[in-house]
Structure formats: C-alpha cells, structure tokens
Image (cartoon, grey):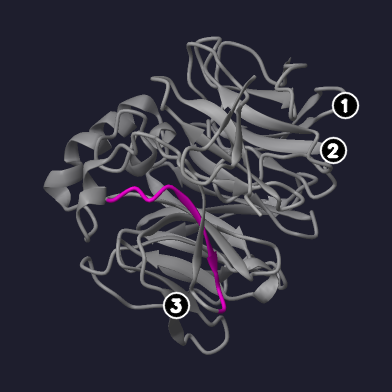
Amino acid sequence: MIEFRDELTGALVRQLTNESAISHPSYFLQSSFYPGDKALFFTSYRNGVAHLFECAYPAGDQLRQLTSGPIGIHPFSPALHPDGQDLCFVRAGAIYRLNLATLAEVEIVRREGASIGECSISNDGHWLTAAAKIEGQNGILCGRWDGSGWHFMHYPRTIIHPQFHPLEPEWIEFSGDPAPRMHRIRRDGSGLECLHQHDNTEFVVHETFLGQTGDIVFTVWPFSLRRLNWQTREITTICDFNCWHIAPNRSGTLVLCDTNHPDHGIQIVDVATGTRSPVCQSKASNGGSQWTTSRYALKEDFEAARSAAKSSGTLSWMEAGTDTVYGPQWTHPHPSWSRDEQKIAFASDRSGTTQVYVAEIPA
C-alpha cells in the first residue's frame, strides 16, 4: 500500500494495488466496498486474464483471489448482493454467484454463445438483470437470484447498463446505444417506453438512478449534469459542468463524478445547489477519442472498434479493451462511494498501469 496526500485538496489517498498488471475497482454503478468498509473487491489481470480479488482496507494487504481458471470474467460485471455475502459476475455466456465465505460458485443462468454485460441486482436482492446479445439479437436478460424465471427481452439496438428502479423493482431502466438513450421496461417485458427523445447531437451518457429518489440523473456530455423526473419526464439542470462518470449517494443529495477535457479531477456535486467540491486528482489517462467531441460516434468512428469487440467476445464496442473511441475503459477513473460515503474508490493509470485507489473525502 502506498499512501500520499493529494496535491490540490490534501485528501488522503491510498494506492492499494501495485502489480505490473491492470487492476481496477468495480464499475462506477456499483460500490466495490463490502459492508463495514474493511475490505473491497476488484478486478485484476495479474494471472493473465481478468479475475476477482479482494484486499483489506486501509492496509491493502490480506489479498485473496476470489475466482480462478483459464477463462476470465467480464471485468466490469461484478456486483455485490445486498446481503453482503455473495457476489455475482459474468463468465463465458453465464452469470454466476460466488459465496464470499466458501468461494463456491453457482451458475445462475447460462445462454450458450451469448455476450453478457455488467450485472445489476434489485435492492430487495430477489432479481438480477444484465444486457446481452444472444444469437445476434440484442436485449435484456432478467430473472431471479435463485436461478428461476429467467427470460430474454429482445430490443433492436445494443443495450448497456440496465438497472432496477430502487423503489419499484418491477421496472428496469436501460440505455439504448446510441441515441435515444434512456428507456424503461417492466421486468416481465411490458411497458417499453423511451423516456427522452433526442438525436446523435445530444450526447447523453452514464444515466443512473439518483439514489433513493427514483429519478434519473444523467450527463449531457460535456456540458451539464441533469435530472429526469421518473413520473413527469421533466428534465432539469443540476449544474453546467463536464461531469463524466456519475455515482449518486444513497439519499440522492450528492453526485460523485470524474471529469475529462478538461480534467478537473474527481468532484462531488450538491444536487440542490449545483455547487461542486473537489475530492482529489485522478491523473488517469482517460482514453477515448470520442470524449473530445459532443456527439455519439458515427459509423466511421467506431467501425474498427466494433470489429475489435467482436473478435474479443465483448458485449459492446463501447466496452472493448482495444477501443480507442470510448476507451479503454480501464483508463477511466469510474469513481464510486464507500459504504459510509466518507471515501471513494477509483482507478488510475497514473503510474503507467491501472491500479486501485481509495481517497478519503476532505472535510
């Protein structure tokens, strides 16, 4: 573990990993911390393919490998069950749950040959969903945590980031790729609806639920952070700022974000006032040529990246490790909250290789 103070804010920052291979926390839509904040899980390529590990916090020691074998996991798929006792993750056309005490794996659902994206678990712990491509068709996989009731809801475009409504778990919000982005559907496949009509020039990204408010918060890149009322569809601006990957706190009063073009470091936005407080610098390289623009990628922008994604077996050209349009994803900080919301985890390749960092939020 390497400990230092951020040069601008004085925040205490700890680098928890220091391998020659890429290591990064979970996706920004998930917290990487276990309940109690005494340890966190992360993805590492130290064995050649992506596998799950955990380490103690704040020491960064007591490293434990959670998954193993020649076939790696989807690096951004892990999610912690609300009971804190199990993780789920994607590997080779299937979603698994992993018991943290025994490391026993149970296959929840399998679709042979499918590409499956990151997982989302309902707040009540009963339901699980993930974007998927099965036999050339895009859609959403959804079913119960216990492995029952799984079905596939077809959608004509690529889907990313499906998430359960925090208060009404019969609803799933998901992103269509590219525009228009924000949609919702009931977990039984009914009620499909576009929440906001827009075209390629309104670069909506990284939408997620605003904590327990039930509303949606999203970025119009690189101009503003906005809020969509789940009931009325009214959109309001929280602040005009280049918020990038966004992670609201549980109450929906604060939004954690990283920034890019220009990089203002990792910030926290007060939802009520739009004021911002810096946490620390990430000094990540923030790869992806499309982030210098204010529109979705056109065919000529992503044709090569899509080909690379297909050959690597990833779900979407946006998630491809070789993508230079929107990634590589591991070069992005993807900040997320600790359980007590006094710390943040983020990724940075400031040392030349992406590592796991935790920063304490300055008072």
The residue carrying pointer 2 sits among few (fewer than 14), some (14 to 19) or many (20 or more) residues within 10 Å by Cα, namely few
Whole-percent x and y of residue 252? Answer: 64, 69
- Image coords of residue 49 (percent x, y): 51, 16
Q: Is residue 266 magenta?
A: yes
CA distance separating discs 1 and 2 = 7 Å
Q: Residue at x 48, y 14 (%)?
A: 21
Residue annotated with mark 2: 85
Location of mark 3 (residue): 195
Outermost residue, left side: 300
Q: Earlier in the sequence, mark 1 or mark 2?
A: 2
Vertical placement of residue 323 versus 274, above or below: above
What span is colored magenta in the figure?
A: 262-272
Q: Disc 1 marks which residue?
A: 101
Circles 3, 2 touching at the beta carbon (< 8 Å): no
Other residues around mark 1 within 10 Å, as few (<14) / some (14–19) / many (≥20): few
Measured as percent of width and height from the top left, residue 1 is found at: 64, 19
C-alpha gap between disc 3 and disc 2: 35 Å
Q: Nearer the viewer, mark 3 or mark 2?
A: 2
